[in-house]
Image: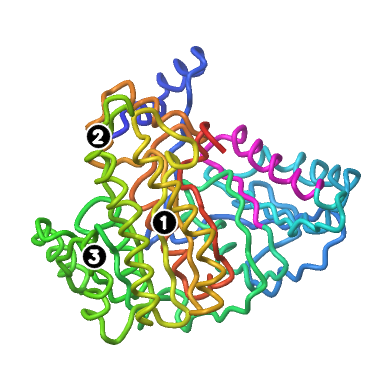
Amino acid sequence: MADRYLSFTGTAPGRFLTRRLGLPQPAPLRRWSPDRPGLDGERLLLTAGKSDLDLAAADLGLTTAPAEHPAAVVLDATGVRDVDTLAEVHAALHPVVRSVAASGRIVVLGAPLDPADHHQAAAQQALEGFTRSLGKEIGRGRTVNLVRLTDARAAASTLGFLLSPKSAYVSGQVVEVGPQEVTPPDDPDRPLAGRTALVTGAARGIGEAVAETLARDGARVVVLDVPQAGQDARRVADRLGGTALALDITAPDAGERIAAALPDGLDVLVHNAGITRDRRLVNMPAERWNAVLDVNLASVLRTTDALLAAGALRAGGRIVATASIAGLAGNAGQTNYGASKAGVAGLVRALAPRALAEHGVTVNAVAPGFIETKMTAAVPLFIREAGRRMNSLAQGGLPSDVAETTAWLAHPASGAVNGQVVRVCGQSLLGA
């Protein structure tokens, strides 16, 4: 369903009226397209503190020359170690933040917190509050994110994503990038070429968008959905040059059947299938609780365990699960859904280090907020409008926003990103 309020605020009367009434003024977001794959303008590099980071190694096209309206600003704050050097964060960004172009990007680079130096830890943790706060005030479709890293080369795919139109609905996030060595793909435009990706619940909605984006990036996509959605799954698979797999993901042997269907192995596993059965706990029968927990969480656990045990995920593989801000912040009428999605986050954080050490596979999650789908279009008007406006970008996201974030986590050069739960919510004003 079209966001008529967003369209209205783009007109002269709309801008006048919303400004006079103090109403949200969302800006149209610049998203990726084949003809405009990057942001238009300079990428400005600023520094706070004494940094040893070699950003040139990440080949980000940064410049230290003054730019009138930079499309992006990268602030290297890895050298911030105390309250005094925090002042350099203000000194660096204060003069330029207003000039950042609409739908521009600000990325703050921080260092891991040093447990042996509480002054450094305090100063680096302060960057998180700074980043989230700036994201909530900057406006005009601009985003602000924090990346903690030690090696710019390991963070190249992450910084490339956050400095591109692909991250249009990702803001106020903190992403930790480990020290693992990564290998860039042979073809930057088709990083998943030669790789096989399976997406559950891919016959429609967000799952379909994820399958499309992974196929765009070169993957051979397996579109998995329940047998009842077989026709839609085949339609999506045929369009993308992939294959369809009709399977109930809650079946006890789902993992074994997936492994049997892919004897050559799998490189990307996207757990997207999910359901809702909303009702307040006092009115929720056990079957509604059990159905949601089985599809959204138990099937993810069973299938992941089975595929890892069978060695079906090749070294360098990626597991991306779908959480939700309902699992991070809670939502009335969704105790079952919130529990299942919080469980996904717990799975990711616990399994990630072991999966990487034992199988060479990373495990991450995306946590969507209000995304414009057929499901949200059926939500009552006032609740739908609240969902759209209660984030820093004052609008709903698109399935493609979730898909682009998933594709970044699935990228061959994203091996240093592990155990992360990244919200795709326009920086929701609710929850953490």
- The residue sitting at 38% across, 70% down in the picture is 305
Left or right, 243 with respect to 66, comes to: left
Residue placed most toward the observer, 9 or 224: 224
Q: Earlier in the sequence, mark 3 or mark 2?
A: 3
- The residue sitting at 48% across, 61% down in the picture is 364
Residue placed most toward the observer, 422 or 17: 422
* Residue corresponding to mark 3: 252
Toward the right, the furthest residue is 84
The kind of residue tagged 1 is: Trp
Quarter holding residue 375: top left
Element on which disc 1 rests: loop
Q: Is residue 85 magenta?
A: no
Residue 225 bears which disc, if any?
A: none
Q: Earlier in the sequence, mark 1 or mark 2?
A: 1
Looking at the rendered image, the disc whose residue lies closer to the viewer, 3 or 2, is 3
Badge 1, how many Cα within 10 Å: few under 14, some, many 20+? some
Q: Is residue 123 magenta?
A: yes
Left or right, 286 with respect to 388, comes to: left
Q: From which residue to which does the magenta span run?
A: 122-147
Element on which disc 2 rests: helix
Q: Is residue 316 above or below residue 127?
A: below
* Residue corresponding to mark 2: 377
- Residue 292: where, in percent of width, then height? 28, 45
Q: CA distance from mark 3 to mark 2?
A: 33 Å
Q: Earlier in the sequence, mark 1 or mark 3?
A: 1
Which quadrant of the rendered structure holds the N terminus? top left
* Residue corresponding to mark 1: 32
- Residue 92: where, in percent of width, then height? 79, 46
Which quadrant of the rendered structure holds the C terminus? top right
